[in-house]
Image (tube, rainbow, N blue to C red):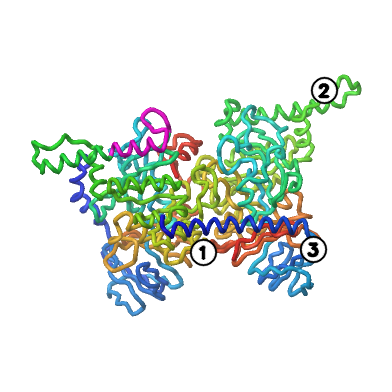
Amino acid sequence: MNGVMKISKSTIKLQTMKKIFFCLCLLFAAFALRAQIAVRADKVYTMAGEVIANGVVLIKDGKIERVGAGLKIPANYTVYQARVVTPGLVDARSVVGLSGALNIPVDQDQLEKSNPIQPDLRAIDAYNTDDTLVGYLRVNGVTTIHTGHGVGALISGQTMVAKTKPGMIDDVTLVPAAMLAMTLGTSIRANFTSPGTKSKEIAMLRAEFIKALGYEKKLQAKDSTKRPARDLGQEMLLKLLHGEVKALIAANTATDILSAIRLAKEFKLKLVIEGAAEGYRLTDKIKASGAEVIVHPTMARPYGEMANMTMENAAMLTRAGIPVSIESGYESYVPKTRVILFEAGVATANELPYEEALKAVTINPARLLGLDKRIGSLEKGKDADLVLYDGDPFEYTTHVCKVVIDGRLVADNCP
Amino acid sequence: MRKFLPAGSLIPICLLLYFPAHSQERPIAFKGALIYPVTGSAIEKGVLVVQHGRIIAIGNSSTTVPADAEIVDASNRVIIPGIVDTHSHIGGPEGGDQSNALNPDVRVLDAVNPESTGFRKALAGGITTANVMPGSGHLMSGQTIYLKLREADDIEEMLVVNERGVFGGMKMANGTNSMRGTAGFPGTRAKSAAMDRELFLKAIEYKRKLDSAKKDSTKMPDRDLRMESMVEVLEGKRVVHFHTHKMNDILTVLRLKKEFGFRVVLHHVSEAWKVTDAIAAAGAPCSIINIDAPGGKLEAMNFSPKNGAVLEKAGVAVAVHTDDPITDSRFLLRSAALGIREGMSRQKALEALTIAGARMLDLGTKIGSLEKGKDADFVILSGDPFSVFTHVEQTWVEGRKRFDRAIPADKAFAVGGYKVYTPESNEEDEDNHHEWSDENQ
């Protein structure tokens, strides 16, 4: 063991110490005074109008107070300087917090394999705010995630929306039951003996929906003794069938995408197609169906049901007038999650117009989640979720320097 | 018949193979590009002239261009040497099976499909040379092959013989991937090393017999294919490509190297940042991977994206690899750029893609930089090598254009699309992700 090693080890230890100290400072700041913040940047992408050159974002009590060019900064505001500022990034679909970083049985809660249909499983009962990957997404600019039960079951369970800021589940949750996560395609077969075919998948779902409608009818019985016992799964399915929660259907091949559209039409589901690897082949049909689309990571591996994916998928869907969001999705191995900032960057290098790529990770997913009054753009009164960069956000060599969530600094990565 | 020749006899055959069969006759001059020769300083508005598969001239705008040369306007373009991927699994490189943890006799040469679309994908990423390896599910999963991404219908046409007279290395692994605990496989780290040692000791004994026989056929030991390749390892001809993640595992590799004297390249080395000094002291080059997020694999949890920067600072030779499919062959330039983001210098990042990897394969005198006399392997880029907005426009192997983004059928391999990629022969079903998950990285 010579000096070089000691230095590198102790440097890293020092960095850890610094991080701990930084966190303590944050906690102190949280309990003591709530400093107001002003962010100044060469370019501010508000996602609500033109890019602002030499822009200033004033933040007060966790909300955006004002956004504009060359605003006067009040004396008691802490000033952060950046080259570029964007709204906090919104990951349209993740499993982070349920599918843990360690990838060992005790930290994998995204898929329950006892039954292929489990609409009663709630994401908030599993979400681990402390998982390494939640923190990792946070320091890489993701301030809100739509996460929850994963792919691989017909109905794997519910999803939720949370801020990635440190805190307990109730402090960070925005929507406890956001959508119902469903999957079509061959990935189900690895986990269940039935359904074992595509037709059986749809047959089982149709039967399940019809059963739920029957349950609803029985609930309306005048004689209360004839009403059925409470069934949490059926209750959730009724929310789905009434359009109170959206149907988040993972479908990648053209066949599965069209089946999802057919099913949604029959049962009047509010359809969100997730993955959509072959979506570019069906832009007209998707557009006509009114379905919303969350596109697979641009750098996803072209294997299995993703074999026919293209990095230009987001561009082609957008060109057809379908607003897209880009997801980090689900990864079974290394890396354990994708980072939508990187995926959107590669999408814009592959024909997706620059502003559209930014929209796909900010305001589009905010709308998809019904949260665009709170997040997704930098506008007066919205949550103060911001990302500060030292260069073009999409460049490989650019750093996410600072991240602000609800008006508080949660990441400080640049010296 | 050459497929059945003993390892030692392969050298003359392969020297013949090395010369490209259809190299172009008329010189081609690429003019006006910003050229990064990598072993020399960048050349603005440079000139690169290639003929017969080699570079015949490189320099500034006053470089003499042969009168009969075809001129290619490469202004506003950037030219870098062909990228060397030191660790890839494209083409279906199956190594050892479930019967044995140590497979020095198994050659991926006998498995790889030269017509795999994986090679087209790699060319789309600017890769011209790849070390195609079996997985890491064995202590020693087999012999790797060094391939030029030439057009070929027989894998032998892609082989490239290196300075030590071989066209591949030996893949080894330690840590959890190779600890299956089933019959013939180790269940612990100490057992892993003990099994490695046993094999090396056997090889030393075999070599002693070979040496003392002094080529007298009556005294020669019986032929042993397992031992023949191990002798090449002991002689330093065949480099050991060692998959290793954790700091204790890295140190075990260095200990074995010291004990048996083999030459090694450390692959992945997730915890390199913890044992940088030991790696530097051992003079072991590192072929690293850069991934987008931690996690997914317990023993790689302490991966640091700063590995490249830390190793560079310590003077360790660093290459960056894809481990395709762990990262995609189309994104190796990006992986190097991520190294820069975390503190590597641009120069060392360029080297990590080219000459550093070439040297790890003992091919540094033939490839890895743009110099007169070296192979005409290069990539024409639309802009800065490390920008997300840059595309690989053309990839040239030995003076032949192997990828051209302007041709739609080629571009499809860069971006993907309907029925562009065909599954490898060993991808039996659509959901075999788990298979390669365990075998790789």
Q: Indicate the amino acid at tag 2.
A: Pro
Quadrant that contains the N terminus of chain B: top left
Report, in whole angstroms, how far the alpha carbon at label 1 lies from the one at label 2.
62 Å
**In screen coordinates, is A71 left or right of B70?**
right
Residue B201 location, x and y as percent?
25, 39
Residue A220 location, x and y as percent?
87, 27
Both labels 3 and 2 in a single chain: yes
The label shown at residue B387 is: 1
Q: Indicate the amino acid at tag 3.
A: Lys
Do residues under tags 3 and 1 come within 8 Å of each other at their CB atoms? Answer: no
Do residues under tags 1 and 2 come within 8 Å of each other at their CB atoms? Answer: no
In the figure, B202 relative to B129: above or below? above
| Nearer to us: label 3 or label 1 | 3
- Where disc 1 sits, the SS reads loop
- Report the residue at 70% width, 39% height from top: A123
List the single residue furthest toward the right: A222
In the figure, A40 relative to B116: above or below? below
- Where disc 3 sits, the SS reads strand
- Report the residue at 46% width, 38% height from top: B438
The label shown at residue A60 is: 3
In the figure, A367 relative to A49: above or below? above
List the single residue furthest toward the bottom: B62
Both labels 1 and 2 in a single chain: no
Question: Which chain is disc 3 placed on?
Answer: A
Residue B90 location, x and y as percent?
40, 46
The label shown at residue A228 is: 2
- Where disc 2 sits, the SS reads loop
| Span highlighted in magenta in the image | B180-199
Q: How crowded is mark 2: few (under 14 residues within 10 Å), some or many (20 or more)?
A: some
Observer able to see residue A342: yes
